[in-house]
Image (spheres, coloured by chain):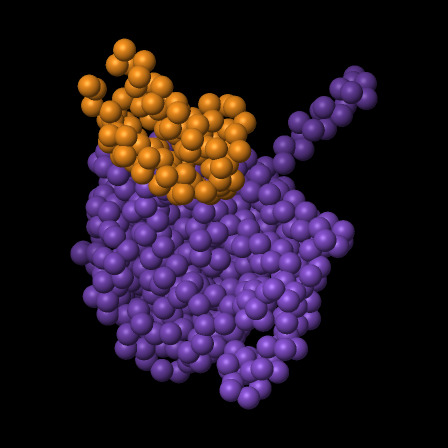
Chain colours: A purple, B orange
Amino acid sequence: MKTAAEYEESLRGLNFKVYLQGELVENPVDHPIIRPSMNSVKATYALAEDPQYEELMTATSHLSGEKINRFCHLHQSTEDLVKKVKMQRLLGQQTAACFQRCVGMDAINAVDSVTFEMDQKLGTTYHERFVKFLTKMQEEDWTVDGAMTDPKGDRGLAPSQQEDPDLYVHVVEKRDDGIVVSGAKAHQTGALNSHWILVMPTIAMGKNDADYAVSFVAPADAEGIIYIYGRQSCDTRKLEGGNIDVGNKQFGGHEALMVFDKVFIPWENVFMCGEYEFSGSLVERFAGYHRQSYGGCKVGVGDVLIGAAALAADYNGAAKASHIKDKLIEMVHLNETLYSSGIACSAEGYKTASGTYLIDLLLANVCKQNVTRFPYEIARLAEDIAGGLMVTMPSEKDLNHPEIGRVVEKYFKGVASVPTEHRMRILRLVENLTLGTAAVGYRTESMHGAGSPQAQRIMISRQANLAQKKELAKAIAGITIK
Amino acid sequence: MLDRRVSINFCGGCNPRINRGNVAGEVKDLLTSYGYRISFNSFDVNLVIYLSGCTSNCAQKYSKCDIPSVVVAALTVDTEICDESMIVVEIVKRVRSFYEQLER
């Protein structure tokens, strides 16, 4: 396995073409806006080195029998699925941010079972190619970006009906030695902290969309790939050089638009090319795994937010008020409810034909549906407890100012024994998580990441087994069909 | 005298009710001073101390090993409720008792 230092060093060897606020970035690893997101991924390597966290952070490869980072592992049991959620909660707690590496883990698990089933039905050799890649990924301890979401253009039209064909990633040329692809993937979490990209189709497709039913891996810095870095609320505070106003100095997350401009992919790296009838199950399984993920990572970040709100109450001198206690209880209740469904969909997982375990899709979708709601309520309660000062207090430059610093110190003090700086730090952390850079991950990603709410409702409807429920009701009510 | 090898095996630490790092550090220091050899997350020992942060007891739950053990799960030591300040004492007491019986 790579050490945290080796991971950082390995990124320095990549040649990304990334634009941030209109400028080409020469050194993404040390860029002050990007760096905290790299630190979050780096934590997935650092914790795997620590005996205290090894149980969750590592697994035994079913391919090599070697100890590997769990992010490179295919789930071999429901125990693995449960440990995945617990690992994600742990990392959410340790970073208070999106640590980005889950998308790749969810992608490899989905691609494994789907390519196996494709080969069984069609006689293709995609699974064998995938296993070769996975073996290397485990050996090298790569971070892989699972890239699914296309820009999608007109949502009322299929990929092949779009005015601009590049609005979905598609094959533009097939050669003897590989394929050439163009298009883009949007919202790419952690792309610039990844060694490889694993591309998957974004929706179920029909015969006319065969060129869009494509899955492959490419080096994250491959020729022809460019990135445009996504803005986050309050992101330029990271350029100010302070450590209070950013809320979370060390960790963060990122998303980027990833553009493929006639990128060549050798056949050995292609895992789907035209088999449109399998694009739906690949999407469904990746989304299912990723909806499970949110029952871990968002809960871990929620733990930090609940802790911050409780500290804010302490520092305000309000901790003994019954309504504050009740609000904290409600936050814990909501957070643990999310965790419950993350654990439940894992415990109820099952083995697929390839041997890899899949979560219970109904419970995973229920989990994510709750995630589209509960973090918002937890954030609302945190803001309620924190008070309006969270968004009206002056900057750390004012706190540190030789003249007005004393004024800030005096008038922004809460409980006498707590330094004003501590109060400001905790309020900035609440701000960071509820409406600053981390709100991208904790709020809007909770809404739309792994699929928007309606996508889960469709899956819940498909999995609901209403026919059986009707029979139950008939039996109890004494209804018999003559 | 037996080679007194003991391993402290951690859960993953996602929901700790006790400070596992502190407990492990103090147990290691104390037992080392008594001549024990302490490792982490190993089964190549005579005795395992399973150190779980909560009552799920993941340190032991997923272990497929039947080596004699002391099990700490949140505020319990071998299922007996224990104040956090006494966990280290209880662990050390059990480890020493185990080896004393073994060497008798």
The residue at the far bottom in this view is A403
Q: Is residue B98 above or below residue B6?
A: above
Extreme-front residue of the structure: B33
Classify A122 as above or below A71. above
Residue in the picture at 33% in, 26% down: B48
Can the viewer see residue A70? no
Q: Residue at x 23, y 43 (%)?
A: A135
Where is residue A84 drawn, in percent x and y? 42, 41
Q: Along the horizontal axis of the image, is A187 left or right of B66?
A: right
Instruction: Using the image as rendered, state which of residue A208 and residue A19 is in the foreground.
Output: A19
Query: Which corner quadrant of the image does residue A249 belong to?
Result: bottom left
Q: Give the residue displayed 59% in from the left and 50% down from the top.
A: A371
Front residue (pair B50, A103)? B50
Q: Position of residue A256 (x, y in %)?
A: 41, 68
Which percent across, then down, holds residue A453?
61, 53
In percent of width and height, residue A265 lies at 24, 59
> What's the residue at 40%, 73% (across, down)?
A33
> Is A95 above or below relative to A480?
below
Q: Nearer the viewer, residue A70 or A134?
A: A70
> Can you say which quadrant of the picture contains the C terminus of chain A?
top right
User: Does residue A7 appear anywhere in the picture?
Assistant: yes
